[in-house]
Image: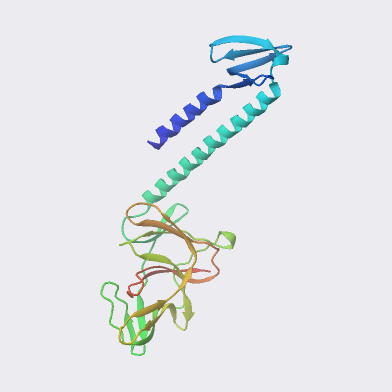
């Protein structure tokens, strides 16, 4: 459908560009499709009368006619180029979307090849010890402080992008419509800390603190597929793509490292 509309627009542009105003020095004009300056005469094809006519060159404002014709042509060409660019972007979007699985998770396209990220196993570390974080049935926590941790000081998922291009793009297929983003992960001895938690006494409300990276997001489909990438180049370090519901302690993490 988009291709048909684009072809129709180009056709309309061609028809529109074929007719233009031949300005006269007295302020009037003839609508023409073509004209030629032949010495002291201007020969033109009248759109109104569908025939060739001519008149003295002294009566025609050739300079204004040429200037407006050139400006109009440039405007039409730019409009056509903008539409072609938009169509190409839409086509690229469709091509990218087709390459991403429908299964919930995090993916990347690297050299046009699909890379699938495995969700990291995270644990809740409290004064009582460590317990594996269960997304579907979060563990009850006693009041106090805790951390959400990933084992190991470095992620096995290395993304080798450097300099001003260090803005890795991820595709995220959500299992349900929740918040998501990229976080900076703090390295400690033998672990990486993804979130810092505070469990409020009495209400047992969980306050989650995480180091979110400013990101851009783009919805790729109506079924929960998004593209996400950092606004600024990422420095070397440990990171994770995160999906979460604020205050529910149900985060899922897909860790990666920028060397």
Residue 31 visible in rendering: yes
**Residue situated furthest front in the rendering:** 26
Residue at horizontal 70 percent and vertical 24 percent from the top: 63
Examine the rendered structure and indicate whether residue 200 appears above or below residue 214.
below
| Percent coordinates x, y for residue 21 in the rendering | 60, 22
Residue at horizontal 31 percent and vertical 58 percent from the top: 103
- Nearer-the-camera pick, 196 or 156: 196
Left or right, 62 with respect to 135, comes to right
Q: Quadrant of the N terminus?
A: top left
Residue at horizontal 65 percent and vertical 10 percent from the top: 54
Examine the rendered structure and indicate whether residue 215 appears above or below residue 31.
below
| Percent coordinates x, y for residue 24 in the rendering | 66, 19
Residue 149 visible in rendering: no
Residue at horizontal 52 percent and vertical 63 percent from the top: 160
Q: How many numbered marks, from 0 up?
A: 0
- Name the quadrant containing residue 131: bottom left
Examine the rendered structure and indicate whether residue 20 appears above or below residue 233.
above
- Nearer-the-camera pick, 138 or 28: 28
| Percent coordinates x, y for residue 91 in the rendering | 43, 43
Left or right, 250 with respect to 89, comes to left
């Amino acid at each position: 459908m988009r291709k048909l509309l684009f072809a129709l627009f180009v056709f309309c542009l061609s028809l529109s560009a074929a007719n233009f105003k031949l300005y006269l020095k007295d302020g009037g004009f003839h609508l023409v499709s073509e004209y030629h300056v032949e010495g002291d005469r201007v020969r033109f094809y009248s759109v109104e009368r569908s025939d060739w006519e001519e008149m003295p060159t002294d009566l025609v404002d050739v300079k204004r006619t040429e200037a407006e014709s050139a400006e109009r042509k440039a405007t039409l060409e730019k409009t056509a180029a903008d539409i072609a660019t938009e169509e190409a972007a839409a086509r690229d979007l469709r091509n990218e979307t087709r390459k991403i699985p429908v299964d919930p998770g995090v993916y990347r396209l690297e050299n046009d090849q699909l890379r699938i990220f495995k969700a990291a196993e995270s644990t809740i570390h409290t004064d009582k010890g460590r317990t594996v974080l269960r997304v579907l049935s979060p563990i009850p926590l006693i009041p106090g402080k805790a951390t959400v941790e990933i084992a190991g000081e470095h992620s096995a998922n290395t993304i080798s992008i450097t300099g001003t291009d260090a803005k890795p793009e991820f595709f995220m297929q959500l299992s349900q419509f929740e918040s998501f983003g990229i976080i900076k992960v703090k390295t400690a001895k033998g672990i990486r800390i993804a979130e810092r938690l505070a469990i409020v006494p009495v209400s047992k409300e969980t306050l989650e603190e995480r180091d979110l990276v400013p990101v851009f997001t783009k919805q790729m489909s109506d079924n929960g597929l998004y593209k996400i990438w950092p606004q600024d180049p990422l420095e070397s370090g440990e990171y994770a793509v995160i999906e979460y519901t604020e205050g529910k302690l149900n985060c899922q993490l897909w860790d990666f490292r920028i060397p």
